[in-house]
Amino acid sequence: MKRLPVLQSVQSAPRAIALAAQNATKPNRDGSPWYARVFRLTTTRIITQAFCFGLFIFLLWVTWFSRLGGYPASLFLELDPLVTFATAVSTHTVYRWLWRSLWILVPTLVLGRVFCGWICPYGTLHQFIGWVFNIRRNKDNISVNAYRPIFQFKYYLLVVFLILSAFGALQIGLLDPICLLTRSVATAIQPAFDTALPDALAGIAARPGAPHPRVFAGAWFIGFLLIGLVGMNLVIPRFFCRVLCPLGAFLGTLSRFALLRIDRDLTRCTDCNLCMRHCEGASDPQEALRKSECFVCFNCIDDCPEDALAFRLAPVPVHEQIIGSLKEGTARLFGRKVISKLPETVLAPPDVPRRRWVFAGIAGLLAFPFLRFSKAVNARSYSAKAIRPPGSVSEPEFLERCIKCDQCINVCPTNVLQPSTLAEGGLEGLWTPVMDFRTGFCQLNCTLCSEVCPTGAIQKIDLARKLGKEAHVEAGPIRLGTAFFNRGRCLPWAMETPCVVCEEVCPTSPKAIGTYKQEITRWDGKKVLLNQPYMRPELCIGCGICEHECPVQDDPAVYVTAIGESRSKDRSLLLGSRETPTKT
Amino acid sequence: MSNERRRARRDEPEPSAQDLEQQRDHQRIERRALLKGALGLGGAVAAAGWVSLAPPGWPLSLRDPDGERGKPTAAVRSLPEGGFRVPDAPSVADLGVAHGTQLKPMLLAALDALGGIGRFIQRGDVVVIKPNVAFERPAALGATTNPEVLTALIEIVREAGAKEIRVADNPIESPSSCFVRSGIQAATQAAGARLFLPTPEEFALLGTPGATWIERWPFFWGPFVGANKVIGVSPIKDHNLCRASMTTKNWYGLLGGRRNQFHQDIHGIIADLALMLRPTFVVLDATRVLFRSGPTGGSLGDVKPGHTVVVSRDSLAADAYGWDNLLERQGEALPAYFAKSAARQLGQPEWRKLALREVNIG
Amino acid sequence: MFVRDGLRSYRRTYRRQEVYWGAVIVAGLLGVLLWVRHKGQHPDPSLYDMSAALSGAAPTGAQVVVGAERTPLADRGPGAAVQEASRANPAPAPADAPADTAGAAERGPLPPELAAGAFREGKIGAYTPDNLYVKIDGRAEYYLGFGLKSMHSVTLESSSGASVEIELYDLGAARNALGCYNGERAPGAESTVESGSTFRFDRNAAFLTRGPYYARFVGSDETPEVVAEVQRLVEILRTKLPSEERPWAFDLFVDQLKLPASQVSYARENAFSFGFAHDVYKVSLSAADSQDNMEAFVAVKADAAGASSMAKQFQDGFRSLGAAAGQTPAGVPLFKDEFLGSFSGATASERWVIGVNSAPSAERAHQVLQQLEQGLHALSEAVRAKAQPAPEPAKGGENE
């Protein structure tokens, strides 16, 4: 039944709507009811993708003190199988909620890379941008979705990352899609969103009630990287997913055991290549499906006019069953004529030559010493400003666990946590959380970062552990570092001017800052009472509110450095300081 | 034109009248296009010239010969003349002190000593209540206003007929955590008042004529839009630098900007705060007294129960009373801000010269 | 999307099976949504639990600094005042070297064997007047004003996390301790006076004075366990601390005038906020809940001339607060307070200065003065000889 062209034939809007509704609910040409077309699997897939993306953004939006409640804020990170696997390799444990990745792993083993096609929010973003700004005609769409050898690159990356993990340097966070998107949203997108939001909508701001707009070190790079990678979809659709994604590579390697896959019926396929028009994974459905690239998006089934593609259980290549020659057109399969001219080659997931695997392995083996011995993260020369959040394990274990997802940075109420730059942690520590007390300070009664860390780089601690009270009195409070006075810049010490904000805001009781009281006669004859502060290092917990409030803001007269932190025995300052066990 | 072409032209038939007509039409069109283009060009040039050369006062002129116009200006607001005070009433007491454990009766009794809540709050008032929520501490540590006192006060104000009650403070630590952990947010919401968080767009420059340090300073303006009564509720705390933090220093929490410079002349600043904001009345919440290790406290051993509230229109008097009787520093000299503020006629530190009514409730 | 036919799909057949699978998947999504919502509404209680912030025990690792606070010599402003010289008195090198029997010295007058039941001794601290503010920042001046000699503190902690802290102040003389005790007592709080001790309880705290000592007990919370422990510790200190002979003024107020001992107080300096008034004993004559605040007071000087000059100072002081209001029948000038409307007066009787403050009427003031005069005369010779002025408080260097 031909559909009436709606706009050309009708002048008024209500009639147009009624006509459109009528058109939409007509039975299909093959007799199946209208809802079989409207609610086909690709529609469900789009709904699922939208739902997962929305849920992802919601969970990041809700990662804030006033909203967190009990929401599983790091759910997608915990679902990410590469995070679980790589941390299991580096720490030999599966921390806390990371077992949830089984909910993704098991379907992957059965269905293939459904995660990439249905769930991954970063993949949804790429797909959406690639679809909205797609200006190609059919022919170009088909050619751009062909498989290219460069898609092997993600497997090299995966090998390098896994070897590094085995040695204790967890770097998957650099390119893992969930970590990358979490980091980008937390440090670049949310501050931009909050700034652009009109006052009337302040209730839906990402960070409501924040006294200052949130700032993050290196957000420019993270943001531009996001724009760049997403922009590459205009060149090759789902560029990141096909070329760079280590999680995709991991799931692709596991897909080789998948029970269900797209199968091409040679007796129906006319080699029109329309199936490649919107193939998301560039997995060659028109030839022999590369299961490790297939995103199970079902776009190929949607585009095949001959019904030649189907999602079947455990198909085995049929080329041995063909009688006759494909080229001459005399081939027959199970009694039917074989139309397609393209033979079905052996499925080879993933299609990486063995020598290239070896090369990747060697690169990984070398990468570890290059990273680890580049001074920035070594015990002999760690950066004084690399102050980790409270509850962090000691540095070697931290680098085994931190996936640079920046959820802790996302939730921190005072904006003190910043993604590390190359200066503080080298490449190995890039984008891991460090504290910058000029933007904020560690609030005394807050343990939010430990709650949202998915991998246990920041162990879950309760308030009693952080403050050194109740059961933890013997161990003492968690110290992040120690504060020091730069007397040459301090107003009462060097400038005859009363101050002592640092002592006022010091939260410990008794205060870790004491004052010598001196009454002096200034250069202009005025008498002033100076409270000259000094440190009591046994009491200092390194929270940094003194540095934050010091009026000499550009280079504070009291500043916190990492020494004396309780998480590392080799970074203690005082002989009498007690060692805090790192794993409680 | 080449010779060949000339010859070919010569041999061509002459253009007909119709053709010439057509040509003239075309020329007309060309003239019109020229006119349009010329007008557009002229207009653009005239506009550019006007904008850059017309004298600065003229409309649409952007001329700035000496850079003065380019300097950023910010609107400076002011609070109402005379602050938020109600008229004097000589026959009532100036200080109302109530001892006991039941907060609402205590507050009511103390307010009755001053003439009753009706003297201060009338129907339809928009009231701003400013508690001290400076630190993220549980209320029991005495560093913040007791949320039960705030609840009782909001109820009393509501019963007096206030149309809208606003609770606001700009804490030193992270605002959302401070309001929640001190119990003030829960108390505010349970009592039905409106909470204001200090987000950047709520701040505006405030002019305080006559102030030494804060003549123009960023101020938490949002809650004050449309408000006509202001009440301060502060705890009573020891303070290493300014010796005590009570109702006069409470207004510190309405300022923004770089407050960490204030400690260079803390007493001058407190005197300026007294000048900046003249409240309707203040409540000194001495249900707990943070008598040492203030203003942050941090240990229950720093707090002792005080079982008292003091209400007054005069924050200096309330502070002096608290200094003598609740912090028990009678005999020590008053902090310097008392003298500075008294010199500006902002209050009477010698509370014994004022009429005082003291009640014991339960 | 912007391409012609971009939204179109080329398949020709559709299956109902896909719709069923789709429904199952959408149902799964709804399930996920409900699960997330459920998790959101059931937060982990430890995340918002602030009780740890209220625990009494101070974090360990806090070594208390013992020994005098030294102001550093370098980096001072020009023309630094003379106070520095006295402050720069270096005390002996820190007494925190516990190698010898300094442990015993650290306890000071704290009795041994305080720990019992569930409570064990924790930190012990010893403080001198110069470093007291390390411990009780902001409050030190009060005790220094009563002539503090030293303070010792001990915290008793139980395994359940509860604790009680004792601060024991040695104020040198019973009168100082008594004055310090009463200065921290709210007007309504009643004390118990028993066999040389004066004490009171207040929920999870207690205050005790005995001999030259003043002790404060503070519990970490108000559980019955902690309150019982406080009571037990008060009992111990009451029996173990040395007592002193009670000051002579008690003979006058308690024995002669029959007033309750718990109402007697002492001001070492600044009595009634007068700068000259040192060493004054006061007794409160009004009921605790009444509006009046009548007090009788007495002071002793070295000789009659000293007494009469102090009486004159009192008279001048009362006059400055109001106006002269005639005399008592005995010839003592009375003064009426300008705002309170009460009567005050003072006079000398031999070496003693007697007076009344804030009497509600002139008759009452006269009555009290007569009682004091008669009481003085009725004292035995021994007591009169015992009544000597206290040493003047040292000027400068001591008070901040």
Image (cartoon, coloured by chain):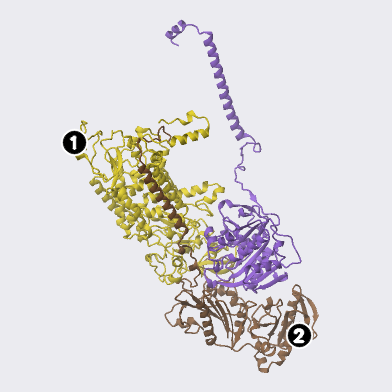
Chain colours: A yellow, B purple, C brown
- The local crowd at label 1, few if under 14, some if 14 to 19, many if 20 or more residues have their Cα within 10 Å, is some
Which residue: 28% across, 35% down? A269
Q: Is residue B114 above or below residue A166?
A: below
- The local crowd at label 2, few if under 14, some if 14 to 19, many if 20 or more residues have their Cα within 10 Å, is some
Q: Is residue A235 above or below residue C121?
A: above
Q: Which mark is residue C367?
A: 2
Q: Which residue is mark 1?
A: A323
Find numbered disc 2 in the image and state the secondary structure of the residue it sits on: helix
Residue A254 in percent (x, y) is at 29, 50
List the single residue furthest toward the bottom: C381
A88, A358: nearer the viewer: A88
**Side of B171 relative to C335 (left or right):** left
Quarter of the N terminus of chain B within the rendering: top left
Q: Is residue A349 above or below residue C41?
A: above
Subunit under mark 1: A
Q: Do discs 1 and 2 belong to a common subunit?
A: no
Dividing the picture into quadrants, the one containing residue C300 is bottom right
Can residue C135 be seen by looking at this rendering? yes
Subunit under mark 2: C
Find numbered disc 1 in the image and state the secondary structure of the residue it sits on: loop
A157, A25: nearer the viewer: A25
Label 1 is placed on what type of residue? Ile
